[in-house]
Amino acid sequence: NFKDQTPNSILNYWKFFKCQVFTMILEPIEGHGTWDGKKVMGNLPKQTDYEGRIGVLTRATIRLGKMKSFWQHVDGIAKQMTGADGFVTSFGIGEVPWIKQATFSVWESKEQMKNFAYSMKDHKEVVQKTRKENWYSEDMFVRFKILESHGSINGINPLKRKS
Protein backbone atom coordinates (compact mmCIF):
# COMPACT_ATOMS: atom_id res chain seq x y z
CA ASN A 1 0.00 0.00 0.00
CA PHE A 2 1.38 3.39 -1.04
CA LYS A 3 0.30 5.14 2.16
CA ASP A 4 2.01 2.47 4.28
CA GLN A 5 5.29 3.33 2.52
CA THR A 6 4.90 7.12 2.77
CA PRO A 7 6.57 8.86 5.73
CA ASN A 8 4.13 10.24 8.32
CA SER A 9 5.54 13.75 7.88
CA ILE A 10 4.43 13.76 4.25
CA LEU A 11 1.03 12.27 5.05
CA ASN A 12 0.53 14.89 7.79
CA TYR A 13 1.50 17.67 5.35
CA TRP A 14 -1.02 16.45 2.79
CA LYS A 15 -3.71 16.18 5.46
CA PHE A 16 -2.96 19.62 6.99
CA PHE A 17 -3.15 21.38 3.62
CA LYS A 18 -6.13 19.25 2.52
CA CYS A 19 -4.17 18.04 -0.51
CA GLN A 20 -5.73 15.53 -2.80
CA VAL A 21 -3.54 12.53 -3.40
CA PHE A 22 -3.61 10.55 -6.62
CA THR A 23 -1.15 7.72 -7.10
CA MET A 24 -0.43 5.46 -10.05
CA ILE A 25 1.67 2.32 -9.80
CA LEU A 26 3.45 2.00 -13.13
CA GLU A 27 5.71 -0.44 -14.93
CA PRO A 28 8.02 1.09 -17.57
CA ILE A 29 7.67 -1.01 -20.71
CA GLU A 30 9.30 0.93 -23.55
CA GLY A 31 11.12 4.15 -24.22
CA HIS A 32 14.29 6.03 -25.04
CA GLY A 33 16.26 9.09 -24.02
CA THR A 34 17.77 10.43 -20.82
CA TRP A 35 16.89 12.53 -17.77
CA ASP A 36 19.82 14.68 -16.68
CA GLY A 37 22.12 12.40 -18.66
CA LYS A 38 20.87 9.18 -17.04
CA LYS A 39 18.72 6.33 -18.31
CA VAL A 40 16.51 6.54 -15.22
CA MET A 41 14.22 3.71 -16.37
CA GLY A 42 17.08 1.41 -17.33
CA ASN A 43 17.54 -0.04 -20.80
CA LEU A 44 14.03 -0.32 -22.21
CA PRO A 45 13.03 -1.66 -25.60
CA LYS A 46 11.82 1.04 -28.02
CA GLN A 47 8.69 -0.99 -28.83
CA THR A 48 6.70 -3.82 -27.26
CA ASP A 49 3.52 -5.61 -28.26
CA TYR A 50 1.60 -4.26 -25.22
CA GLU A 51 -1.69 -2.70 -26.37
CA GLY A 52 -3.63 -1.94 -23.16
CA ARG A 53 -4.22 1.36 -21.39
CA ILE A 54 -0.93 3.23 -21.36
CA GLY A 55 0.76 6.07 -19.50
CA VAL A 56 3.28 8.20 -21.37
CA LEU A 57 5.98 10.42 -19.88
CA THR A 58 7.37 12.99 -22.30
CA ARG A 59 10.21 14.98 -20.75
CA ALA A 60 12.62 17.52 -22.24
CA THR A 61 15.14 20.16 -21.34
CA ILE A 62 14.35 23.14 -23.55
CA ARG A 63 17.27 25.16 -24.90
CA LEU A 64 17.06 28.76 -23.64
CA GLY A 65 17.08 30.15 -27.17
CA LYS A 66 14.20 27.85 -28.17
CA MET A 67 11.83 28.55 -25.27
CA LYS A 68 9.66 31.01 -27.21
CA SER A 69 9.24 28.56 -30.10
CA PHE A 70 8.36 25.76 -27.67
CA TRP A 71 5.88 27.70 -25.53
CA GLN A 72 3.96 29.23 -28.46
CA HIS A 73 2.82 25.72 -29.41
CA VAL A 74 1.94 24.31 -25.99
CA ASP A 75 -1.64 25.60 -25.49
CA GLY A 76 -2.89 24.65 -28.95
CA ILE A 77 -1.45 21.14 -28.79
CA ALA A 78 -2.71 20.63 -25.22
CA LYS A 79 -6.26 21.60 -26.27
CA GLN A 80 -6.15 19.21 -29.21
CA MET A 81 -4.82 16.42 -26.99
CA THR A 82 -7.73 16.67 -24.55
CA GLY A 83 -10.16 16.12 -27.43
CA ALA A 84 -8.23 13.28 -29.06
CA ASP A 85 -9.73 9.78 -29.34
CA GLY A 86 -8.57 7.61 -26.46
CA PHE A 87 -7.26 10.48 -24.31
CA VAL A 88 -7.99 9.87 -20.61
CA THR A 89 -6.08 12.54 -18.66
CA SER A 90 -2.77 14.38 -18.45
CA PHE A 91 -0.60 16.17 -15.93
CA GLY A 92 2.02 18.83 -16.55
CA ILE A 93 5.18 18.47 -14.52
CA GLY A 94 7.63 21.36 -14.24
CA GLU A 95 10.90 20.15 -12.75
CA VAL A 96 12.56 23.51 -13.39
CA PRO A 97 9.79 25.92 -14.45
CA TRP A 98 9.84 26.92 -18.13
CA ILE A 99 13.01 24.94 -18.94
CA LYS A 100 12.76 21.31 -17.79
CA GLN A 101 9.25 20.23 -18.66
CA ALA A 102 7.36 16.98 -18.67
CA THR A 103 3.87 15.80 -19.49
CA PHE A 104 2.40 12.56 -18.24
CA SER A 105 -0.63 11.48 -20.24
CA VAL A 106 -2.89 8.45 -20.08
CA TRP A 107 -4.47 6.85 -23.15
CA GLU A 108 -6.93 4.00 -23.64
CA SER A 109 -4.45 2.32 -26.00
CA LYS A 110 -1.01 2.73 -27.51
CA GLU A 111 -2.61 2.90 -30.96
CA GLN A 112 -4.77 5.89 -29.97
CA MET A 113 -1.79 7.64 -28.38
CA LYS A 114 0.28 7.08 -31.53
CA ASN A 115 -2.56 8.39 -33.71
CA PHE A 116 -2.45 11.65 -31.77
CA ALA A 117 1.35 11.86 -31.53
CA TYR A 118 2.26 10.96 -35.10
CA SER A 119 -0.86 11.41 -37.24
CA MET A 120 -2.49 14.57 -35.86
CA LYS A 121 -1.20 17.25 -38.24
CA ASP A 122 -0.35 20.03 -35.75
CA HIS A 123 1.38 17.76 -33.24
CA LYS A 124 3.28 15.96 -35.98
CA GLU A 125 4.53 19.32 -37.32
CA VAL A 126 5.67 20.42 -33.84
CA VAL A 127 7.54 17.13 -33.33
CA GLN A 128 9.29 17.69 -36.66
CA LYS A 129 10.19 21.29 -35.66
CA THR A 130 11.67 20.14 -32.34
CA ARG A 131 14.08 17.90 -34.24
CA LYS A 132 14.81 20.18 -37.20
CA GLU A 133 15.32 23.29 -35.04
CA ASN A 134 17.02 21.41 -32.16
CA TRP A 135 14.72 22.73 -29.40
CA TYR A 136 15.89 20.28 -26.72
CA SER A 137 19.28 19.66 -25.16
CA GLU A 138 17.91 16.28 -24.08
CA ASP A 139 14.63 14.41 -24.09
CA MET A 140 13.10 11.22 -22.80
CA PHE A 141 9.97 9.35 -23.82
CA VAL A 142 8.77 6.42 -21.70
CA ARG A 143 5.58 4.38 -21.94
CA PHE A 144 4.16 2.62 -18.90
CA LYS A 145 1.74 -0.17 -18.19
CA ILE A 146 -0.64 1.13 -15.50
CA LEU A 147 -0.84 -1.47 -12.75
CA GLU A 148 -2.99 0.39 -10.19
CA SER A 149 -4.38 3.81 -9.35
CA HIS A 150 -5.56 5.18 -6.00
CA GLY A 151 -6.94 8.47 -4.76
CA SER A 152 -8.55 11.35 -6.58
CA ILE A 153 -8.17 14.65 -8.36
CA ASN A 154 -11.09 17.03 -7.96
CA GLY A 155 -12.89 14.25 -6.11
CA ILE A 156 -12.58 11.55 -8.78
CA ASN A 157 -10.07 8.95 -9.89
CA PRO A 158 -9.60 9.91 -13.56
CA LEU A 159 -8.59 6.36 -14.45
CA LYS A 160 -11.77 4.69 -13.23
CA ARG A 161 -13.70 3.74 -16.31
CA LYS A 162 -17.18 5.19 -16.61
CA SER A 163 -19.93 2.61 -16.93
Image (cartoon, helix red, strand yellow):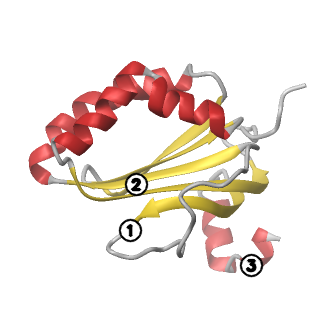
Crowd class of label 2 (few under 14; some 14 to 19; many from 20; radius 10 Å): many
Left or right: where 73 falls relative to 123: left
Relative to 7, residue 155 above or below: above
CA distance separating discs 1 and 3: 25 Å
Find out whether the residues at labels 1 and 3 contact each other: C-beta distance under 8 Å.
no
Find out whether the residues at labels 1 and 2 contact each other: C-beta distance under 8 Å.
yes
Q: Residue furthest left?
A: 65
Quadrant assignment for the C terminus: top right
Residue 38, horizontal then vertical, whole percent: 39, 76
Residue 59: mark in rendering: 2
The secondary element bearing badge 2 is classed as: strand
Q: Is residue 22 visible?
A: no
Pointer 1: what residue? 35
Residue 5: mark in rendering: 3
CA distance separating discs 2 and 3: 26 Å
The secondary element bearing badge 3 is classed as: helix
Q: Earlier in the sequence, mark 1 or mark 3?
A: 3
